[in-house]
Amino acid sequence: MFHLECIVCGQRYGAEEVVYTCSRCGNLLDVKYDYKLLEERLSKVDLKRRPLSVWRYRELLPIKDEGKIVSLKEGGTKLHYCRRLGEALGLKSLYVKTEGDNPTGSFKDRGMTVGITKALEYGFKAVICASTGNTSASLAAYAAKAGITCIVLIPSGKIAYGKLAQAIVYGAKIVQVKGNFDDALRIVMELSLKGKFYLLNSVNPYRVEGQKTLAYEVADQLGRPPSFLVVPVGNAGNISAIWKGFKEYKRLGFAEATPKMMGIQAEGASPIAEAVKLGLSEIRPVEKPETVATAIRIGSPVNWRKALNAIRESGGTAETVSDREIVEAQKLLARLEGLFVEPASAASIAGLRKLVEQGAIDKDELVVCVATGHGLKDPDTPVRFGEPPLEADKTLEAVVKILEER
Ligand code: F0G
């Protein structure tokens, strides 16, 4: 029903093989399905009868044994109509998909439910990943649920506190690497080739399949795909997966159109945005990525080729935002809509603001912004950049006085 195919040389791999990249040319792999058969077997009416969740779309996911599915009830996240934020940015129809609603607080859970299930199908007893925080939190939770060992490599001192707490409490073996995410990923990719640990970074084509369900959900929630889908980009798996989801929905006749994919990167870590803007056919990795949005502090995104395809094929574009713009956007979303998202997620709002100002997105367009992770993941950033609380003596008069002063 499905197999893997190299996105460059077309080499095929059977579903029984454990393979992460093409052994012939080293490029990324993609999962391919028999869409004709799916079209015959699946109807949108049937899908819509099931609860909104990743597994609503199980026939479109690369699982052989439904009995092995490891789920924490991921997906089915809310799509908020944001009237006040829309007005502030100059948009009539703005929605924010809050992926922080997922079990571990980020979109990674969509991928991990599929990824861990594959690990069990293949008979692995241990899983591994490199992470800027959310992947490790998610993998640790799903490994715990499955009862298998989880190893995570994280850049020393550069992951948000909430995410570290999650990996610790779920019982992962955590190794802080004295380097950045790109260094950690290189190590786990090499380690996974030894065959003992199943690699669950977004280079794994099965994991990102789970993430494409965000596209199906958005199309189902709105009744049609938006004109623009704005998403933060780090290792670039998510934008690629979401684009695949929209393409599949159209191909199956479940949607009439696809959105333009708008990828947002932090200025200090923006090789994909640079390649899009300069029309390069390959990215130029950033040696020392830096941004307050530690989730997307990545200089050499493994999925760059898929992401460039997604942006170009969809007719979208990419934009960069500064740390100041990210922090501003985080506040704006919280204060106008009551939604608290982490800095990387706020990058999509900051990017949207720029794209509207530049005229790249018209005020009448239907726009969905993906808020990839919950704000409580990174409580330090708002405290560091926000106004400190007032302080008063423990009397009514003192409190009244200080409130009047401000
Ligand atoms: N937003 C958040 C909150 C993330 O955690 C990430 C990636 C992204 C956006 C970017 O997604 O990598 O698919 O382009 N976090 C990874 C991690 C790298 O290790 O948690 P991407």
Image (cartoon, grey):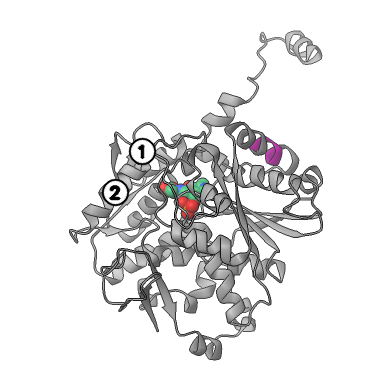
Q: Position of residue 17 (x, y in %)?
A: 26, 74
| Residue 243 disc label | none
Magenta stretch containing residue 331, yes or no? Answer: yes
Horizontal side of residue 328 vs 38, given as left or right: right
| Relative depth, front residue between 379 and 156 | 156
Amino acid on which disc 1 is placed: Asn
Give SS at disc 1.
loop
Q: Which residue is mark 1?
A: 180
* Magenta: main secondary structure: helix
Q: Which residue is mark 2?
A: 186
Residue occupying the point 60% across, 85% down: 43
Magenta stretch containing residue 302, yes or no? Answer: no
Q: Position of residue 60 (x, y in %)?
A: 49, 76
Residue 405 visible in the snapshot: yes
Give SS at disc 2.
helix
What segment carries the magenta color? Answer: 330-334
Q: From this view, report whether residue 161 is shown above or below residue 79.
A: above
Number of callouts in the render?
2
Please identify the quarter of the rendering in which residue 322 is found: top right
Characterize the local packing of mark 2: few (<14), some (14-19) or many (20 or more) Cα atoms within 10 angstroms: few
Characterize the local packing of mark 1: few (<14), some (14-19) or many (20 or more) Cα atoms within 10 angstroms: many
Q: From this view, report whether residue 377 is shown above or below residue 257.
A: above
